[in-house]
Image (tube, grey):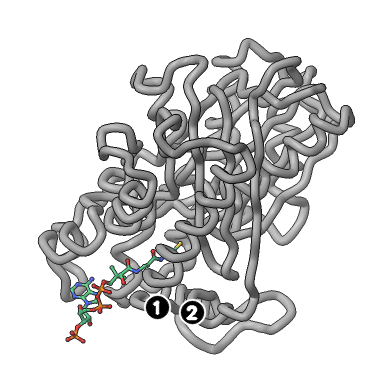
Amino acid sequence: MTYARIAGTGSALPERVISNAELAAKVDTSDEWIAERTGIRQRHIAAEGQTTGDLAFAAATAALQAAGVDASEIDLIVVGTTTPDLVFPSTACLVQHRLGANGCAAFDVNAACSGFIYALTVANQFIRAGTAKTALVIGAETLSRFLDWSDRATCVLFGDGAGAVVLKAADEPGILSSHIHADGGYKELLWNPVGISAGFKDEPNHGLRVIMQGRDVFKVAVKTLDRVVEETLEANNLDRHQLDWLIPHQANLRIIEATAKRLDMPMDRVIVTVDKHANTSAASVPLALDYAVRSGKVQRGQLLLLEAFGGGFTWGSALLRY
Ligand code: COA
């Protein structure tokens, strides 16, 4: 049996940090409100001209270095993103060329905040099927580009960044299972109402913005994540106490705490970066994973549960032995 194993991780964040206090000077909000409701203290925001592809390339370079893998060895690049540099070519193609990995398969996956779990799932299937031996999986976003910076209900929640992993075929797990789902019936609870085919609007930023029913999203997210972590434990015949780390999507500390409670995990075994990164959508899980690895928290051989939830709705999880 062939499994996909994480050989290295990497991440990248824009230099510019915007604190809650700085936002409070622009919209009617406060550090207290944001921190209490979400756990967010600051976010990184891309510089003018700095793209999703730039961040993805930096994260990928770090992951390849950590894995000791040369770009020429890559068979597949999958990028989870909702904010690609261009309509086409895909961000994966742009990153591939910059890495010098020309010739391998490369494409983007759009599953909003679940983008990395979706991309990881796709790459895992390629490796399990024997179609690829080495895959680069990236979650990268510049959500700041389509935020409405005058809307306090949404602009305080998001940030920019990228995270990446190199997967290699191995005889031992690796990724034990992953589970991805979607329900398009929830489209209008969390969405961006314009696009290439639907058209743009004669509004600031062409109508690009996040429209969100925050309270409803919160409720569905908690319930749905409960279900997907149960599904993952059941599929692996695993007791929740056997998990070493929960590496959740970083949207809201209260959502993270609810999942941890469900798993009976103390918060010191949960990776939290939402305070520093805010919600970086598809980049959030690989950013948290890279932080966990580089800070020495996550050790080789430990059992990790990754999960995410996002617009669509989409959601998913991955159980892996690091
Ligand atoms: N600063 C200050 N006040 C704000 C605010 C802000 N940034 N944003 C909203 N408010 C106000 C609202 O206008 C409302 O005022 P009112 O009571 O006078 O009407 C009040 O705060 C409460 O708003 P509500 O939306 O009920 O707050 P909440 O406790 O549900 O917290 C969220 C709002 C967005 C933090 C929370 O619902 C949430 O995190 N939802 C999930 C969002 C998410 O994770 N999205 C991404 C999924 S991938």
Asked if disc 2 and disc 1 are in contact, CB closer than 8 Å, the reply is: yes
Q: Which residue is mark 1?
A: 216
Q: Which residue is mark 2?
A: 189
Side (left or right) of 158 relative to 52:
left
Residue 238 vs 22, above or below: the answer is above
Residue at 74% x, 25% y is 3
- How far apart marks 2 and 1 lie (CA) works out to 7 Å
Q: Quadrant of residue 148?
A: bottom left
Q: At numbered mark 2, what does the secondary structure look like: helix, strand or loop? A: helix
Q: Could you tell me which quadrant the N terminus lies in? A: top right
Residue at 74% x, 17% y is 170
Q: At numbered mark 1, what does the secondary structure look like: helix, strand or loop? A: helix
Q: Amino acid at mark 2?
A: Leu
Image spot of residue 174 (x, y percent): 64, 24
Between discs 2 and 1, the one toward the N terminus: 2
Residue 281 can be seen, yes or no = yes
Residue 238 vs 275, above or below: the answer is above
Most foreground residue, 112 or 231: 231
Side (left or right) of 16 relative to 284:
left
